[in-house]
Image (cartoon, rainbow, N blue to C red):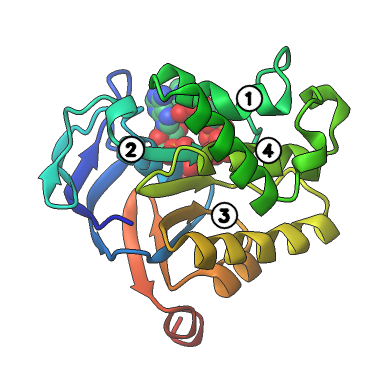
Amino acid sequence: MAEIKLNHIYKKYDNADKYSVTDFNLDIADNEFIVFVGPSGCGKSTTLRMIAGLEDITQGDLIIDGQVVNDLAPKTRDIAMVFQNYALYPHMTVAENMAFGLKLRKVDKAEINSRVQDAAELLQITDLLERKPAALSGGQRQRVALGRAVVRQPKAFLMDEPLSNLDAKLRVHMRSEIAKLHKRLNTTIIYVTHDQTEAMTLADRIVIMNAGEIQQVGTPLEVYNNP
Ligand code: ADP
Ligand code: ADP
């Protein structure tokens, strides 16, 4: 649950001669499911990474629940990011992968175990907890990556093309799992995809980006019926 306000945000990478994101201005409501779409290189990932704190904001304010967080470290922003390539640690079991972020944050052991169990049940991976990532299918890895975010009980989830490495059938299945997750957890999600069907089925509102700018914002019906 978080209200996220991007107040006229700009990004220029140090080694770049032009801006990657220009005047990105958007208010995201508590529990909203927002989807960013747009061609490769239009600034979707950069915007997510600024929200997560993985990239500095060149200009403008990022406001989470009323607090300007531009200078807060990623760890203290209470936002979880799920990546396209899952980013699991190969030498750790599923349970250890899920627990890792909580250990870093000094959550106590009993609490960690209970959260890992709950998230594993939610994502239906209870029987995989002792396996290593190498022994999992793509869909199972994606569930673990989601589970690792869920255990943190973050204010918001950022998902950067989380399903794009899955085959078409599995992608459709995981899409509805993510929709369920959103309902069950009652949480804010910002989701990047290339897939128009994903955007239409998941989004409360779609943000269409082009060349670093917001081109259009609206519900799926508004966006795809008024080109
Ligand atoms: P995608 O479009 O699938 O998000 P990219 O291939 O654009 O992925 O980027 C992958 C990684 O490379 C990201 O971490 C991004 O920040 C970095 N990257 C992209 N473009 C450049 C660039 N021109 N110079 C340096 N790093 C870049
Ligand atoms: P998208 O996620 O929409 O594919 P990105 O946010 O990855 O787009 O990239 C937006 C623009 O910023 C692109 O022109 C890309 O080349 C540039 N870019 C991304 N990451 C870096 C980086 N680390 N250094 C320099 N330029 C980058």
* Residue at which label 2 appears: 78
- Circle 4 — which element? helix
Q: Label 3 crowding class (10 Å Cα cut-off): few <14, some 14-19, many 20+?
A: many
Are dots 3 and 4 in contact, CB under 8 Å? no
Q: Label 2 crowding class (10 Å Cα cut-off): few <14, some 14-19, many 20+?
A: some
Q: Is mark 3 within 8 Å of ligand 2?
A: no
> In terms of image quadrants, where is residue 18?
top left
Closer to the camera in the image, 190 or 128: 128
* Residue at which label 3 appears: 193
Q: Is mark 4 within 8 Å of ligand 1?
A: no
Residue 97 image label: 1
Is residue 24 shown above or below 102? below
* Cα gap from disc 3 to disc 2, whole angstroms: 23 Å
Residue 144 image label: 4
Determine the residue positioned at 66% across, 18% down.
Answer: 89
Check disc 3 and give the amino acid type: Thr
* Cα gap from disc 4 to disc 2, whole angstroms: 19 Å
Horizontal side of 172 relative to 158 (left or right) equals right
